[in-house]
Amino acid sequence: MIKTDAIIIGAGPTGLFAVHQLGIIGLKCEVIDNLDRAGGQCIELYPDKPIYDIPAIPECTGEELTNGLLKQVAPFKNNFHLNQRVEELKQENNLWILKTNKENFFSAPNVIIAGGVGSFEPRKITLKEAEKFEGSQIFYSVSNKNLFQNKKISIFGGGDSALDWALELSKTNQITLIHRRSEFRGANHTLNEVKKKEKEGKILIKTPYSLTSIEGDKIMTGIEIKHEDGKLEKIKSDYILSFFGLIMKLGPIAEWGLNIDKKTIPVNTETFQTNKEGIFAIGDICSYPGKLKLILSGFHEGALAARACFKRAKPNETYKFEFTTASKNIHDRLGLKK
Amino acid sequence: MIFNTYINQMPKITYISHDNKKNTVEVQVGLSVMEGALQNSIEGIDADCGGSMACATCHVYVSENWLNKIEKIHDAEQDMLDMAYEPKKNSRLSCQIIMSDDLDGLEVTTPIKQT
C-alpha cells in the first residue's frame, strides 16, 4: 500500500500541472495512468499537432507541452504508475483506498480525477466473433512478435501502426494488408517500403476492402473481406492484427458513486470537489456552468483543487498563500540553490 | 410580416437514427452538424473530443443527394474516418460540416454506435 497526500488519476496536461501545484504547497502525490507514457490526449491524439492557446507559448506541439510539464514537475520527484487503470475506489475513515488492475493499492485523503474523456482503449473489431479469438489469434497491439513465424497474418488499418507491423512481420510471415480505402496515411518512406515488399510478393495489399466475417469454430482459419463494389473474397489467416486507433472510455470511474452528467463529473467551482468529500475532478472530465474544455482551464482547476487538498492532507496546519517568486519554502521544494 | 418570418427561419437538419427514426431540428447557421446534434439532444453522436477532429465519434453517413453539396472532405478528416465505427463511402465527421442556408434540409444518418 502506497500512502500519500493525493492520488492523481490521469497524466495528461491537467494532471501534470496538478502535480506541480500540489508540489509547491508541499504535498506529495502519486499519478496513475492507463497509457504507457504521460501526456494524455496531447501525446496520444495529437503529438505533432500545434497548440496555439497556451498562455505565453504562441505555438507548441502536444509532445512539447508534455515534455515542458514533465520538466516542470521533475523537482517534486513524484511517482508515475503507468500502464494501469484504477479499478476500485473505496472509503476507509478519512482515507480513500484505490486499487489498480495491476493489483497496486494506494491510500490518500485526496483523489484528483484528471481523466479527460476516460481511459484510452484500442478500437476493436465490431464483429461479434472477434471476441472469441481476442488474445489468441486477434490482437490490437503486438507485445510478443516472436509469436509470428511463418504464419498467415491479416493486418487491418491504414496508419503507421498497420504499415510498420506489416513491414516488420513480412520478414518471416505472409502478410495481407487490408484497408477500407486506397490511400494510406502513414509516413511516406514506410509506405514506399511497403509498396516495394508488395512488388516482391511479401505483402499482399487489399484496398478498398473491409472485414465481413471471421471463419473457424474453436480456431480461426480465415476471414472474408468485401470490396467496396460488393465483391467478396476469402483469405486464410492464422492471425488478425487490427489497428483502428484508440477510443476513450469512462470505464470504472462511472461506478464510484460520483454524480455523472453526460460523461462528465459536476464539481463545485471553489474547490473542484465532486459530490464525495476528498474526491476532486479537474480538466475535461469535470463540468460546471461555463466550463470550457481548454488546457488552460484545466491548469486553473488543478491549482484550486490542490489548495483544497491541503486541508484534508494536513488538518493541523494552516495553508498560507505564497508566490513562487518570493517564497523560500517554495524555492526549497523546487530544489533551488540559494 | 413576411420579412419577419423569413429572418427567423433557421435551416433544418434531419438526423436519422440507425433504426430509421427521423428527428428534424433547426440549427443556427455557422454551427456544425455535431453541435446541432448536441444542442438538440440527438442520440448517436458522442463527440468525445469536442470537435478538434481527434476522435471520430461524431461520425455520420450523409444522404447521397447531399454529398456533393457539402464542402469537400479534407485529407485529415478522411484519415480520422479510418478510425470510425464502420465507415462507408458517404461517411463524414459531423464536426466538420458547417451549417449554412444552402444546407437547409440536410439529412444525416447516425451509425449504430460510435465506439
Image (cartoon, helix red, strand yellow):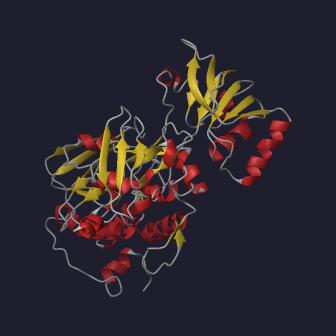
Q: Position of residue A211 (x, y in %)?
A: 58, 28
Which quarter of the image is occupied by the C terminus of chain A?
bottom left
Q: Residue A223 at x, y = what percent? A: 62, 21
Residue B75 location in percent, x, y?
A: 61, 55
Near-viewer residue (A171 or A309): A171
Q: Choose top left, top right, bottom left or bottom right for residue A304.
A: bottom left
* Left or right: A193 in relation to A100: right
Which residue corresponds to the image point at 31% horizontal and 79% vertical from the top-left?
Answer: A329
One can see residue A255 in this view: yes
Quarter of the image for residue A201 reads top right
A285 or A311: nearer the eye? A285
The residue at the point 40 percent across, 34 percent down is B112
Q: Using the rendered image of the protein, determine whether residue A291 is visible from the camera's viewpoint.
A: no
Q: Position of residue A107 (x, y in %)?
A: 26, 49
In the rendered image, the vertical position of residue A111 relative to residue A1, given as above or below? below
Q: Quadrant of residue A233?
A: top right
Total number of numbered labels?
Answer: 0
| Nearest to the observer: residue A6 or residue A212 | A212
**The residue positioned farthest toward the right in the image shown:** A200
- The answer to whether residue A328 is above or below residue A163 is below
- Which residue occupies 25% across, 59% down? A287
Left or right: residue A239 compared with residue A64: right
Residue at 17% of width from left, 62% of height from top?
A268
Nearer to the camera, B107 or A189 = B107
